[in-house]
Amino acid sequence: MTIPPVIDTPDILVDLDILDRNIARMAETVRAKGLTLRPHAKTHKIPEIAARQLAAGAAGLTVATIGEAEVFAAAGVTDLFIAYPLWVSPGKAERLRRLADTVTVAVGVDSAEGAAMLGAGLGPAARSVSVLVEIDSGHHRSGVRPQTAADVAKAASDAGLEVAGVFTFPGHSYAPGMPVEAAAQEQEALRQASGALAAAGHNATVRSGGSTPTALLTESSVATEVRPGVYVFGDAQQLELGRCGVEDIALTVAATVVSHHASTPGTPERFIIDAGSKILGSDRPAWATGYGRLIDHPEARITALSEHHATVEWHGPGNRPALGDRLRVIPNHVCLAINLVDNVAVTSGGQLVDRWTVAARGRNA
């Protein structure tokens, strides 16, 4: 795809045709497995994309914050899961009460103290907000061991909250060779945790998992729903993990070659583009081969980022791009890139067809 002439760089481009194909493929695959799809909207933060996901069959959305939930509720989404162990201040409790007056809301909990705080803050409205107990399935971030899930569920129930089930985030799947193992650990953790809740008398029917690397590996024998996010766009991490192909990349950053670096003999040629960390994001896992990829030049590598510069090593055949050439960059972690802009350029067939506001940008609380 060429960059539309009306686009100034740097700018984020979303290819509508690839986006819709990604949305439809995930929805169809998950439906065929007998699972519910609840995509994580923190990836895109855009109501127009949420509407497409729901139209394709998603049961609702996952979000990370109350602020994101408020944005999507205002856009007409009626079923939201805040997949985060909130520590609820009086202000946040009031916002949750207002949300629960208009939409179906579920919240994550991973401690007896957090559950008690949530129930106390909601007061009489506690029964209107359901909770899912977060389980650590190997990522070792938030979440409790599966065997102790019933203790948190009891505290939530004692606080007047409805315990709807359990959830986990297999974040350790974002590493080479890990998706299959992480998916298996996810299934086992959900099985143990839901069994513990059932043994304690909780009628918890939701068993939620599935990151983008594992969503297509999750089976309905244990899980009931999956919450992938990055799949709508793809990014350089998913590309290097083999979880998507170049043809699945729906979001790129348009950039211009602004400088040629004088290379010493025996070293690769280098050039500078005008897309730095303030639009690409600076995330780079240890195993990644650079700070992003050039979609049309797979041999090139982004070796350094400044705020408004990216240094590219040219390893490809032929001459390096000329000054003024326009290139498309695949960000390493697309969720960070989207949160750095106010709007995105929507293209179809190489033409600019719309601009969408990143409505939930900055809604971090």
Image: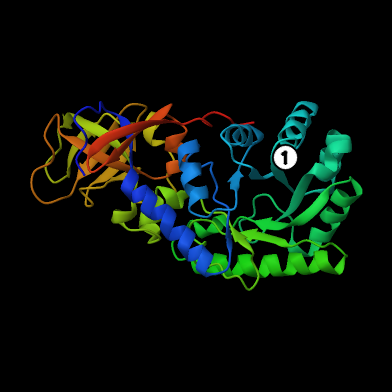
> For this view, does 121 lie left or right of residue 1?
right
Going 51% across and 69% down the picture, which residue do you hit?
32
Residue located farthest toward the right when viewing the structure as drawn: 158
Going 63% across and 68% down the picture, which residue do you hit?
187
Q: Which of 315 and 262 is in front in this view?
A: 315
Residue 179: image location, x then y, percent: 49, 64
Going 76% across and 55% down the picture, which residue do you hit?
164
Q: State which quadrant residue 87 falls in.
A: top right
Total numbered circles: 1
Residue 295: image location, x then y, percent: 25, 47
Q: State which quadrant residue 245 falls in.
A: bottom left
Q: How crowded is mark 1: few (under 14 residues within 10 Å), some or many (20 or more)?
A: many
Check the image and report above or below for 218 versus 330: below
Check the image and report above or below for 200 versus 2: below
Check the image and report above or below for 10 versus 16: above
Residue type at mark 1?
Leu
> Mark 1 = which residue?
86
Name the secondary structure under disc 1.
loop
* Quarter of the figure with the C terminus: top right
Residue 174: image location, x then y, percent: 49, 56
Q: Nearer the viewer, residue 273 or 208?
A: 208
Residue 262: image location, x then y, percent: 14, 32
* Res 178 visible: no
Q: Nearer the viewer, residue 225 or 256?
A: 225
Going 52% across and 54% down the picture, which residue do you hit?
228
* Quarter of the figure with the N terminus: top left
